[in-house]
Image (cartoon, helix red, strand yellow):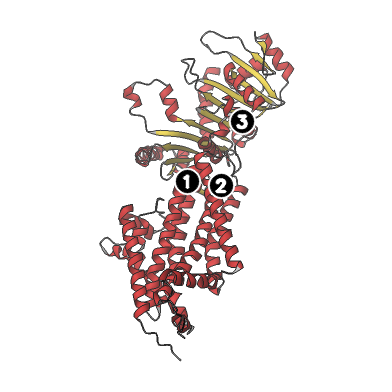
Amino acid sequence: MTPPVQSTPSLLSSAARVFDLSLGQMLWSRRSVFLGVLLGGPVLLAVALRVVTVLYSSGLRVNGAEAAGASVFGMMIWLLYIRFIVPVLGVFYGTSLIADEVDDKTITYLFTRPVPRSAVLLGKYFAYLVCTVLLVLPSVMLVFFLIVPTGGSGIAEAFPALLIDLAMLAIGLTAYGAVFTLVGTWLKRPLIVGLVFAFGWEPAVLLFPGYLKRLTVAYYLQGLVTHQMPQDSAVSMLLQVFREVPSVSTSLACLTAIILGTLWMAGRAVADREYVLEQ
Amino acid sequence: MTTRTRYFVIVSLLVLGVGLGTGLVAYYVGLPAGVFAGRGGPDELAFIPRDATVIAFANVNEIMTSELRQKVHRALPMQEDGQRELLDQTGINLETDIDRVIACLYPDRDSANMPGAGMVLARGTFDEVKIEALMGAHGAHVESHNGKRLIVGEVSEGHPASFALSFMESGLAAIGSTKLIRLAIDLHQGGANPQTGFESVTGNEELMNLVRSLDSGNNAWAVGRFDALSSQAHLPDSVSSRLPAITWFSVSGHVNGGIRGIIRADARDEEAANNLRDVVRGFTALAKMQSGSKPQLQAMMQSLELGGTGKTVALSFTVPSEVFDVIGAAANRAVKPQGH
């Protein structure tokens, strides 16, 4: 009697299995509390601003003039989402995709399944993407409808910019997630390196003229932003002065290259690396 | 996928779907102004035709009882001509009868009148019988339009458009061009309905957004379409080509002890706004420099602040009550020699 032949599932179907398993784990983990606070913040701020505009007839004023809701929304997209939330989510989730399994010593169980190693990484990466996109985009949507109708702005005029914002944030989450997934597969202490990259290297090189800014994700992501960069601090003023905006097509091409390149390298790293779990 | 994960995905997609759907409807069809922000502005806007080029509002009651008004009245006790003429012609006392007024200018395509037909909607307490009798004594006759009485004044020479008054509802008087009053009555009786061709400014979202921002915290404001006004003015090319590329302009202010206000202009694009900002900055600097020798005006000049972002240019100012003391004293000096 010949034993039944067990065919190895394809990369995509294996990744789908891992995705299904990881999405629930990712959503209902302790990290989700952090994610909830992080994304609830802008919504609460928007509610507070809306309450202020309703209670105080003079509304929200900047330099004596009532601030248009669309401008306030643009400022929130820049300061909260692009400069903070998207990189933070990328760092915290991206670096932990494989590192957490190594720390918990559970990676062996995944790698002993009859699925390609890179499918494990891909499934987890898609789970990260769905989890963050489904949290960030509704948060932006709520902020938009709370803030934009105030101060003389209208939903209709600001709507095309919202669509661009949603697409840009989704691309940002994809790019940062891919970069930090690679960091997570390569390094032993990826979180620190990730934080240094997102909040040290990126803001620093963007401040100065030169080619170094091309080695960041933020440079290309900022090329997709339609809102005017806020001039809220001396750093912002410097950023404005040395701001060199790549074209949308260049930004999209470079971000696509970053995403595919880093994911491919991360997949190779997971497939080739021998994980020795500490006892 | 567990049940709660499935619920999370459904709720997230629902928020996104509803938001995108609402945005698309607003973008392609348009949502009534104020669906998400309250309509804003005085209720009387519902009786102003959609194409009005200028709309102005004043809370007369607040302004008349303000410290500034009392001060000006004490300094210059003579009664204003316009106020007396209104009292003589219609029996309406601006000081006691009117709570608030909203006025508009409407491009009258049938006449070459500049700046077009005008109308004032006044909310207050009116003695309708007395006013009608007084206007009748001045040659006015009564007509009926859409079930409302229309008191049409005698057309005087040099005023081709006839003048009318109608009490649209208890405590709301409409005074102005007969054609415009008829339109206001149609809007009052039938409401705005694009199918019948009657639309009020409340359906003009761009204008209502401006009105909402002006109406908050101010007791007087005016907003107008600069390009429409300048095109109606039939200016020579040499003049019109030098006018700044402004689409909307507005002035808003709060009158109490002094006047605090903002003059705002929405330029056609950011470049035009930057140019306008440069011009205003220059004039502001000149004015501040000139006021150096006049300490009474210094506080006012120092309060000038240029603001606004993108296509918007805003100049905020504060006129302290001391400035009106100076004006009052100067006016009294000018009046006294004539009295002797």
Looking at the rendered structure, the kind of residue marked 3 is Ala
Depicted A97 relative to depicted B202: above or below = below
Residue on which disc 2 sits: A59
Q: Position of residue A100 (x, y in %)?
A: 47, 79
- Mark 1 closeness class: few <14, some 14–19, many ≥20 residues within 10 Å: many
Residue found 44% across the figure and 27% down from its top: B228
Q: Position of residue A129 (x, y in %)?
A: 46, 65
- Does residue B281 appear to the left or right of B193 in the view shown? left
Q: Residue furthest front?
A: A1
Q: Can you see residue B88?
A: no
Q: Position of residue B210 (x, y in %)?
A: 52, 38
Q: Quadrant of residue A259?
A: bottom left
Going from the N terminus, do you reach mark 1 or mark 2 first?
2
Q: Nearer the viewer, mark 3 or mark 1?
A: 1
- Mark 3 closeness class: few <14, some 14–19, many ≥20 residues within 10 Å: some
Looking at the rendered structure, the kind of residue marked 1 is Ala
The answer to which of A116 and A99 lies nearer the viewer is: A116
Rendered image: mark on residue B46: 3
Depicted A187 relative to depicted B96: above or below = below
Residue found 72% across the figure and 26% down from its top: B170
Rendered image: mark on residue A158: 1
